[in-house]
Image: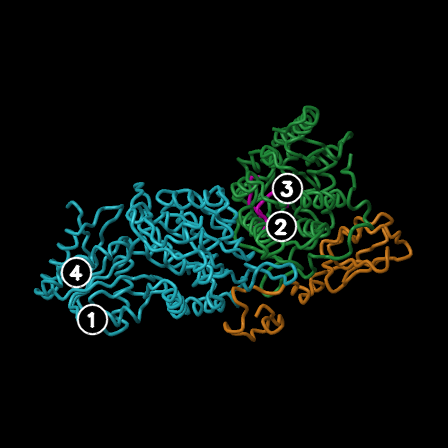
């Protein structure tokens, strides 16, 4: 069930104006750049963006070129949650004291700056429930610095610091359940999204912006260079991630799960994996067990979500 | 409430005085993380906010790194921000300290000077702020609780000056000042508002005038931005003087970047930071009674280093003793000693100079220590030389 | 002080005195950087096949598909990087990637 298209019912309803501008240095076919554009389609009032160090940040703010059309702040890598908290509280108190006006605060960070180094600041911000939307664009590795593994890299994936080697074939560890971690904070609104489903994503951004408290969206954004596929395939691969149940599209409101896109007849995970070079080694016979493990993780996760939706609470 | 406006003298600890100043300054956002010996500042402010005495957002961050990040965001949004920390907390903030100054955020931070680990030590020394020396912050040092209060107010004045727009730290000795009750005169709320009215931050985040903050600069431009920064921080001395002038008009108290005490005809001058300055002055006065030509120079502003003022004071001294409550391991000497030596050399002053490393980890520096030190200095002058460059004072050999 | 002349900066015609403080600059200057020079193939829309579904418009990561009067689209070749997503997602295959 797709999120009720409450704000933008069809593509034609999506505003024409762009607050994310062309001329940015992101790769041709870059997933995160599309996520930025889609996010900016949903803004509703004076808004600003706090951005962590990463692909989006360096590619959209290389002095003297800035490819944003609204106030944009970059401080460091791991403190997006904190900087956004400060800005949000400042505007709230300044408006109260008659010296400023409220702005919507959108904190944007990659998986590196959220799952790993930025997790503490995110957790603190969520616990304190400041009014802000935190968007994690997930390309499943530290792409900006050259495709190093992160806590978001899935089992089996090859990265430069978890290469498909003769002895250790790719990342051995699991991908962190970030939406679970966020859900456990019981914030008013959290969701996952994919750039392959733009209306769902844009509506979620708008829904989140209207929350008077903390909100969070985890959006999957394939990386043509890091995932090793031809640029034109970005949308197809993002869609396969959803259709194979690899990346479930859900909402979590105060800890309660709702699956937005019920993938009743999932495509085989192999279709998603074989489209990307980073999983190529999993199709060698000696690595078959890792492929099976990944499939099992996806199935278990899906069943768990179904159960949680029944029970009600994520954590 | 109206009684408070009449009472101008209070007895407060250093922490309490700083919190009171921040309250009167009508700060908008406070983000802090508790660490001994700063906790009272944070607790007081939290109480002021909870009781409605201070209209501010009080945020207890989940770490000091986040606390200073919150303040940075808030400052760019145009809020008057305040925080406080010590020791490990300041060290944890380190990355952001550089960024706060280079992003021109007028944050005011009280540092309850405390030793850095390891070993863990919660008592006073200056190693924490010395580690933050080169972060582009303006560093002020209080000698007593009155100064802790006054300098906090002056810090806002200096930080928010449109020519400056830099973060300022107010340093007060951990426990010695933070937890000692001393009498002080406070201004009225109106006087404080008159001294430091809210002025809009010129580059505040505003959707109607959208700017990009913290962009990336390549080798072709980065160095120019740093040269620009150097120009800005060197404007601090005249701005300090202006802030001090207008402060003295309201309070009657005058602050110099360096406070001279009996230095005019002094043969021996001792230089120090923090509460030790008062210990030294007390003993210096005693010795002057016995016709020993000794003087004390206390630095109120440590960064930018008041080079000219120090050079003028030391120009005719026969002997200079620098008190360092921290050390620069692997360096030529303690941080203050290194600054003083450079100043002397640059200004063509050749005089016997020694570094006295003292009081680390809260090791007490008593009046008797000061007397012993001064006697040593007198003897050294008679001999004509020091027997060491660096003295570790009061260490069990 | 927050306004800059991008072209002067790129040519090196600036000093530390003329740069904006702390590099706080007015936004939107990337419009001066024409990423169209990146591409090695470019999309051509066969308008007769176009069904005005706007999928190419919504999916272009570079905002290089422009909506003109309601449902029609055209490519902004100044910024199009030639990634080929528009051609890939177009349902009636009205967009072809041709060598630049």
Name the residue: 21% across, 55% down.
Answer: B279
Helix or strand or loop: what does disc 2 sit on? strand
Q: Disc 4 versus disc 3: distance between alpha carbons? A: 62 Å
As drawn, the chain in green is A
Chain letter for mark 1, please.
B
* Pointer 2 residue: A105
Where in the figure is residue B186, as x and y percent of width and height? 37, 55
Q: Is residue C51 visible?
A: yes
Q: What chain is colored orange? A: C
The circle drawn on residue B284 is 4
Quarter-wise, where is residue C34 in the image?
Answer: bottom right
Region of the chain picked out in magenta, as a range: A136-151
Residue A215 marker: 3
Q: Which chain is cyan?
A: B
Is the same chain shared between marks 2 and 1? no
- Specify whether B375 is left or right of B127: left
Give how far across and how far down residue A147 sits, in percent: 58, 47
């Amino acid at each position: 069930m797709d999120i009720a298209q409450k704000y933008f019912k069809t593509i034609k309803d999506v505003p024409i104006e762009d607050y994310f501008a062309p001329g940015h240095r992101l790769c041709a076919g870059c997933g995160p750049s599309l996520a930025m554009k889609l996010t900016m389609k949903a803004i509703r009032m004076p808004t600003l963006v706090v951005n962590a160090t990463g692909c989006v940040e360096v590619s959209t703010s290389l002095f003297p070129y800035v490819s944003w059309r609204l106030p944009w702040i970059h401080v460091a890598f791991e403190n997006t949650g904190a900087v956004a908290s400060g800005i949000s509280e400042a505007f709230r108190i300044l408006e109260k004291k008659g010296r400023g006006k409220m702005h919507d605060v959108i904190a944007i960070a990659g998986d590196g700056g959220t799952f790993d180094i930025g997790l503490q600041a995110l957790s603190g911000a969520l616990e304190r429930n400041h009014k802000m939307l935190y968007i994690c664009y997930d390309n499943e590795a530290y792409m900006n610095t050259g495709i190093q593994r992160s806590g978001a890299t899935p089992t089996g994936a090859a990265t430069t610091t978890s290469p498909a080697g003769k002895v250790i074939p790719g990342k051995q560890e699991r991908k962190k359940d970030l939406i679970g971690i966020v859900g456990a904070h019981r914030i008013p609104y959290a969701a996952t999204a994919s750039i392959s489903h733009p209306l769902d994503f844009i509506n979620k951004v708008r829904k989140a912006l209207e929350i008077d408290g903390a909100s969070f969206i985890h959006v999957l954004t394939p990386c043509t260079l890091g995932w090793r596929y031809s640029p034109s395939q970005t949308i197809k691969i993002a869609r396969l991630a959803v259709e194979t149940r690899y990346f479930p599209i859900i909402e979590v409101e105060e800890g309660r799960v709702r699956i937005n896109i019920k993938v009743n007849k999932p495509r085989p995970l192999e279709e998603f994996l074989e489209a990307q070079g980073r999983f190529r080694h999993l199709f060698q016979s000696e690595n078959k067990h890792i492929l099976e493990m990944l499939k099992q993780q996806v199935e278990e996760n899906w069943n768990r979500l179904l159960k949680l939706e029944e029970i009600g609470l994520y954590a | 409430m109206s009684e408070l406006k009449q009472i101008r003298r209070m007895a407060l600890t250093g922490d309490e005085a700083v919190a009171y100043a921040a309250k009167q300054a009508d700060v908008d956002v406070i983000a802090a993380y508790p660490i001994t010996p700063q906790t009272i500042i944070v607790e007081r402010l939290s109480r002021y906010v909870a009781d409605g005495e201070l209209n501010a957002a009080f945020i207890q961050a989940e770490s000091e790194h986040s606390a200073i990040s919150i303040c940075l965001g808030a400052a760019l949004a145009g809020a008057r921000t305040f925080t406080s920390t010590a020791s490990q907390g300041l060290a944890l903030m380190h990355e952001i300290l550089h960024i706060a100054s280079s992003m021109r955020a007028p944050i005011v931070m009280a540092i309850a000077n405390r030793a850095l680990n390891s070993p863990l030590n919660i008592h006073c020394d200056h190693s924490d702020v010395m580690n933050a020396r080169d972060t582009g912050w303006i560093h002020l040092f209080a000698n007593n609780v009155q100064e802790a209060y006054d300098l906090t107010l002056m810090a806002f004045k200096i930080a928010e000056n449109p020519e400056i727009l830099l973060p300022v730290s107010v340093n007060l000795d951990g426990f010695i000042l933070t937890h000692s009750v001393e009498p002080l005169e406070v201004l009225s709320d109106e006087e404080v508002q008159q001294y430091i009215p809210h002025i809009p931050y010129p580059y505040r985040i505003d959707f109607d005038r959208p700017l990009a903050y913290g962009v990336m600069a390549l080798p072709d431009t980065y160095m120019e931005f740093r040269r620009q920064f150097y120009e800005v921080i060197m404007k601090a001395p005249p701005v300090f003087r202006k802030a001090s002038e207008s402060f003295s008009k309201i309070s009657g108290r005058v602050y110099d970047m360096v406070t001279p005490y009996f230095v005019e005809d002094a043969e021996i001058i001792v230089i120090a930071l923090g509460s030790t300055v008062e210990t030294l002055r007390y003993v210096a006065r005693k010795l002057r009674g016995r016709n020993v030509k000794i003087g004390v120079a206390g630095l109120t502003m440590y960064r930018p280093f008041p080079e000219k003022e120090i050079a003028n004071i030391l120009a005719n001294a026969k002997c200079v003793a620098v008190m360092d409550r921290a050390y620069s391991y692997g360096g030529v000497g303690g941080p203050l000693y290194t600054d003083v030596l450079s100043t002397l050399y640059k200004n063509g002053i050749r005089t016997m100079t020694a570094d006295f490393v003292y009081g680390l980890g809260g090791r007490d520096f008593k009046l008797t220590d000061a007397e012993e030190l001064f006697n040593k200095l007198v003897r050294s002058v008679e001999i004509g030389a020091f027997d060491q460059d660096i003295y570790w004072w009061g260490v069990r050999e | 002080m927050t306004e800059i002349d991008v072209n002067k900066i790129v040519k090196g015609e600036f000093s530390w005195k003329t740069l904006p403080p702390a590099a706080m600059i007015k936004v939107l200057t990337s419009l001066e950087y024409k990423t169209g020079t990146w591409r090695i193939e470019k999309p051509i829309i066969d308008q007769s096949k176009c069904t005005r579904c706007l999928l190419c418009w919504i999916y272009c990561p570079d905002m290089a598909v422009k909506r003109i009067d309601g449902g029609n689209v055209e490519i902004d070749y100044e910024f199009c990087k030639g990634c080929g997503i528009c051609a890939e997602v177009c349902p009636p295959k009205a967009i072809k990637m041709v060598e630049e």
